[in-house]
Amino acid sequence: MSIQMSLIFGTLLLQMTALLVILLPLPLKARKAIVNMAESLKSSKNFNIGLWFSLILLGLQFADCFNRLQRFSHIGNPYLLVSSRDIDYSAISYDQLASKFYSQRNLYLTGAVLYLTLAINTVLGILKKLVSKATEYNKISSEGTEETEPSEAEKLKSEIKSKDASITGLKKQIEGLQTSYDSLNETKSVSKED
């Protein structure tokens, strides 16, 4: 591999490792450290310039590999053809097959690096929201739970008692309506028999 492709492969390995570390179920302090480090990197101008420069170069290389593969699309794999009479051995050289292989390899590597960049940014956004919600939850749960709990519990108990009273009133009303309906039904059935 050339130095350029070795760097791209190293970037791919680094991104896969970073994504693995981000996705591990780490404690909240470690996740906060990861989010803080990512935020400090995103706020750094030098890092942003380097990142965008690299992404643009990778995008150009991805497009170049795609165009090269379009040039070699007519070459197929001579070893996978069904009949040997369809093969034109004079049209296919090993240099063309090697160039096609290198273009495919470069396309896959650059595409994977671009995809993992997008995935890492998405996962970091989700992790940032998760850390903020976890710290908010910890803050709320640690704030004077004993002071607010009795008053809220008393309010809820009084609401439950009032709802129970209204439910018993509705049950009595339903029973009264049911008995009056049944009495009307009995009188009408008797009058029909007459």
Image (cartoon, grey):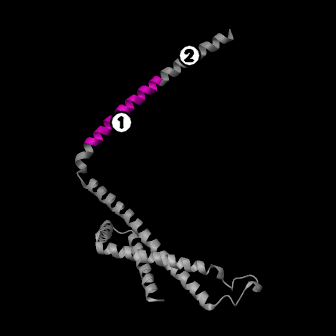
**Chain-order first, disc 1 or disc 2:** 1
Q: Residues within 10 Å of mark 2 (few under 14, many from 20)?
A: few
| Magenta extent | 151-173
Quadrant in the picture for residue 36: bottom left
Horizontal and vertical percent position of residue 71: 60, 80
Quadrant in the picture for residue 41: bottom left
Quadrant in the picture for residue 28: bottom left
Circle 2: element type: helix
Q: Residue shown at 50%/21% (left/top)? A: 177
Horizontal and vertical percent position of residue 161: 35, 33
Q: Nearer the viewer, residue 94 or 22?
A: 94
Circle 1: element type: helix
Q: Amino acid at mark 2?
A: Ser
Horizontal and vertical percent position of residue 88: 72, 87
Q: Amino acid at mark 1?
A: Ile
Residue 66 belongs to magenta span = no
Dot label at residue 183 = 2
Residue 191 appears anywhere in the view: yes
Q: Residue shown at 31%/35% (left/top)? A: 158
Magenta part, dominant SS? helix
Pointer 1 residue: 160
Determine whether, in the image, residue 38 is placed left or right of residue 76.
left
Q: Residue shown at 49%/75% (left/top)? A: 111
Residue 53, above or below 168: below
